[in-house]
């Protein structure tokens, strides 16, 4: 099958466009659909879609493409694309076709790197799970995060939350997260973090202007509230720099979990939208390492594992919590991928 035949056959951009529209982002949906129609104008980018070596959905290929176009629009080039993103016209095909033709190399290079959205909206779900663990064990937390990116969610105890009308977190924080809450509310409990450390293959620095611009480019262009919240979180991270190690998640976590755990602290491993980017071997290493650490847990040195991840069929995003020493697992909630709503089941 030649490349052009594969382009016609592929529908990853249209698939993601349908999801974007369902998630309330019609502008992003229209951008992706126009990109699918105009893709032939960017041979290098088209080749990435036609010959991506792994699952393009798991690799978030459409979101890489969307981020590249948003980055170009934020830089003001080409002018027609900038005007489209400012809603000064609605010629999606004309503006995106021109951008693909002029900036094929930029878009293809951008798509060579996985998205690092570091969505702080997900912190509400993680924080709610921490409240459940706090009520279970009555202890403050030591956090280990996998795939920290810029480390913004390592600062989750510094954010203010409205969880279905219940206030939590740091109430005077400039970062305010109020997801659309469905179902009952979690029982109130402090989000008390004593220590927080993360890992990423390529950690991002909130103090770097290019990093901030990249993260903002991955925010969907028709969601200005998310962009403002991200800007506040980045400013807070410059005041309180997160601790992030440059390493692979599997080996780093093994080392962290093998380190002595202080009595009177609940050790927590958490991750959001990370497992899909790990190799099968690394996923097994992570899961086995957590299970081994759980087997060593005691009531004064408990372990909790919080996941905010797609199911294997990518049908829904689940917030799960496993606590040791019992090893009991609960699905606490179904969630919007960016945390915009939480359907609490806990």
Image: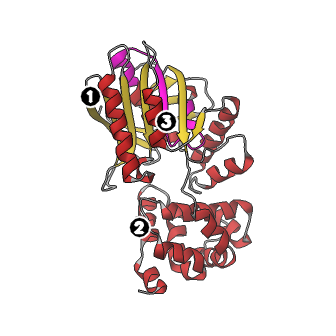
Q: Give the class, few, some or many, for how many residues have Cα within 10 Å of label 2's Cα (few <14, many ≥20).
A: some
Magenta-tinted stretch: 131-156
Numbered circle sitting on residue 15: 2
* Residue 152 figure quarter: top right
Question: What residue lies at 50% left-to-right and 30% top-to-bottom?
Answer: 161
Q: Give the class, few, some or many, for how many residues have Cα within 10 Å of label 3's Cα (few <14, many ≥20).
A: many
Is 148 magenta? The answer is yes
Task: Tell me where residue 262 appears, x and y as whole percent.
Answer: 46, 15
How far apart are labels 3 and 2 at the CA level?
Answer: 30 Å
Above or below, 36 against 110 in this view is below
Above or below, 257 against 11 in this view is above
Viewer can see residue 143: yes
* Residue 271 figure quarter: top left
Q: Helix, strand, or loop for circle 3?
A: strand
How far apart are labels 1 and 2 at the CA level?
Answer: 37 Å
Q: The N terminus lies in which quarter of the figure?
A: bottom left
Task: Tell me where residue 92 appears, x and y as whole percent.
Answer: 59, 73
Mark with earlier residue (1, 2)? 2
Is 6 magenta? The answer is no
Near-viewer residue (255 or 338): 255
Task: Tell me where residue 265 appears, x and y as whole percent.
Answer: 44, 17
Mark with earlier residue (3, 1)? 3
Mark with earlier residue (3, 2)? 2
Question: What residue lies at 56% left-to-right and 29% top-to-bottom?
Answer: 159
Give the left or right position of residue 75, taking residue 27 as reference.
Answer: right
Above or below, 101 against 323 in this view is below
Q: Name the colour scheme.
A: secondary structure
Q: Which residue is mark 1?
A: 327
């Amino acid at each position: 099958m030649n490349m052009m035949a594969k382009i016609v056959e592929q529908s990853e951009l249209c698939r993601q466009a349908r999801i974007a529209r369902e998630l309330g982002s019609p502008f992003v949906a229209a951008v992706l659909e126009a990109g699918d129609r105009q893709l032939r104008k960017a041979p290098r980018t088209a080749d990435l879609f036609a010959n991506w070596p792994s699952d393009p959905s798991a690799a978030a290929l459409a979101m890489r493409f969307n981020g590249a176009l948003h980055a170009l629009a934020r830089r003001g080039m080409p002018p027609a694309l900038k005007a489209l993103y400012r809603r000064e016209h609605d010629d999606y095909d004309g503006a995106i076709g021109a951008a693909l033709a002029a900036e094929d190399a930029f878009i293809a290079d951008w798509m060579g790197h996985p998205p690092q959205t570091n969505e702080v909206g997900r912190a509400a779900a993680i924080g709610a799970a921490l409240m459940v663990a706090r009520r279970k064990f009555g202890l403050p937390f030591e956090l280990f995060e996998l795939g920290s990116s810029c480390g913004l969610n390592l600062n989750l105890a510094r954010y203010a939350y409205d969880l279905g009308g219940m206030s939590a977190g740091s109430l005077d924080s400039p970062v305010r997260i109020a997801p659309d809450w469905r179902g009952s509310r979690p029982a109130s409990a402090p989000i008390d973090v004593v220590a927080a450390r993360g890992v990423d293959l390529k950690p991002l620095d909130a103090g770097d202007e290019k990093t901030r611009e990249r993260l903002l480019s991955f925010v969907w262009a028709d969601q200005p509230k998310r962009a403002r919240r991200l800007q506040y979180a980045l400013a807070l991270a410059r005041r309180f720099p997160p601790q992030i190690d440059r390493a692979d998640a599997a080996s780093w976590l093994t080392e962290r979990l093998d380190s002595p755990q202080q009595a009177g602290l609940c050790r927590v491993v958490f991750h959001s939208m990370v497992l899909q980017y790990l190799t099968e071997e690394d996923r097994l290493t992570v899961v086995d390492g957590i299970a081994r650490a759980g087997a060593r847990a005691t009531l004064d040195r408990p372990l909790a594992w919080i996941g905010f991840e797609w199911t294997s069929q990518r049908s829904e995003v689940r917030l799960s919590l496993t606590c040791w020493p019992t090893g009991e697992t609960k699905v606490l909630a179904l969630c919007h991928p960016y945390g915009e709503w939480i359907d609490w089941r806990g």
